[in-house]
Image: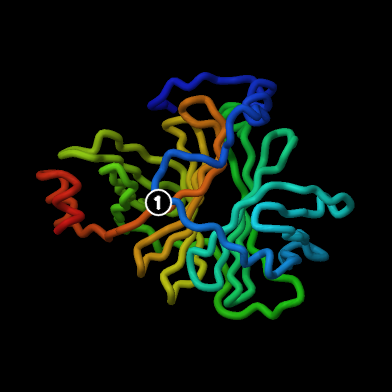
Amino acid sequence: MERRLKQTQFTKREILDIVNDDRYTPYDGGLHFPPSFSDRLVKEGKLGFINAAFPGGESMRYEFTDAHTLRWLYHGFAWREEYYEAYEPEENIVFFFHNIKSSTPPSMRSFVVDFNTNRVTVNEAQIGNDDYTPRDTSNRMSFMTLEGRAASGEPHEYTDDMVGQVIAWQLGGGYWLTHHYINTKFFLNEIGAGPDPFLTIAEPAQYVAIDKAKGLYLFSWREMAGPGIMGWDFMNLKQMRSCGMFYGINEADRFECYCFTRINGKFLSVEDRKLMCREGIFSAVNN
């Protein structure tokens, strides 16, 4: 694949050194509109996540000490303490994530916990995708339920609902993203600030329906034309807002694991797209 950025291709040892470099915090990122932290998980105290799709049920157990400290049961026998961040982008829905310290290859977990239905989507990602290069991310999603609570509503599951849609998202600083959800495996990403998009790339993507009636979806992708980082975005397509995160080695060759939000999203029609091509993104989003 021809990549937009000729990134330094570090060895696996060098990747570990970058991830564990304590001179920088990975939780500060470049996108705007940071949301407020949520203390909902501290109030819950303890949570278990059960995956009934596995024989005997795959489980994850977590304890939340304070707004940024959690403990999780590693392989069922040892508790590990980690820094985490949690947000409540929708009522009774918590988006949280944590880096896994000293793991080889570097890895993290992120969650969408829906207390309205007691259903959970878990995203486990790592840096070092053997199909590409040591700096590229890979991820695996699992659909779980909260232990000891009855699940209701539709299950979290992969979906093709997004296919064929085009959405413009505001980033801040005068920049917009235009996402073309072209099929269930890829999306087309345009970034622009003036009359013409200055970057258009197709990248691997996955889509998960959380609550179709409320317009709640998850969107995961890998920036293969650039540094190979993973994006994971919880979207409300009725209110046109989102809360997500980036994970990986960024364009500055620094480790990042931070939350972002998008605002002022707008579905673009064919006529909007034609107007955008003639007069620029602002003509389309303000139309």
Q: Secondary structure at mark 1?
A: loop
- Reply above or below: 77 against 59: above
Q: Position of residue 54 (x, y in %)?
A: 75, 62
- Reply above or below: 227 against 154: above
- Reply above or below: 230 against 33: above
Q: Would you identify the image quadrant in which residue 141 lies?
A: bottom right
> Which of 201 and 235 lies nearest the eye of the viewer?
235
Image quadrant occupied by the N terminus: top left
What residue is shown at x 42% (from left), y 58% (from top)? 242
Q: Which residue is mark 1?
A: 33
- Amino acid bearing label 1: Phe
User: Dot 1, how many residues are within 10 Å of its Cα: few (below 14), some (14-19), or many (20+)?
Assistant: few
> Which of 106 and 208 lies nearest the eye of the viewer?
106
What residue is shown at x 43% (from left), y 76% (from top)? 213
Q: Position of residue 285 (x, y in %)?
A: 20, 55
What residue is shown at x 66% (from left), y 43% (from top)? 99
Q: Residue 274, can we see it?
A: no
Image quadrant occupied by the C terminus: bottom left
Q: Position of residue 273 (x, y in %)?
A: 18, 51
Q: How many marks?
A: 1
The residue furthest left is: 278
Q: Position of residue 135 (x, y in %)?
A: 57, 29
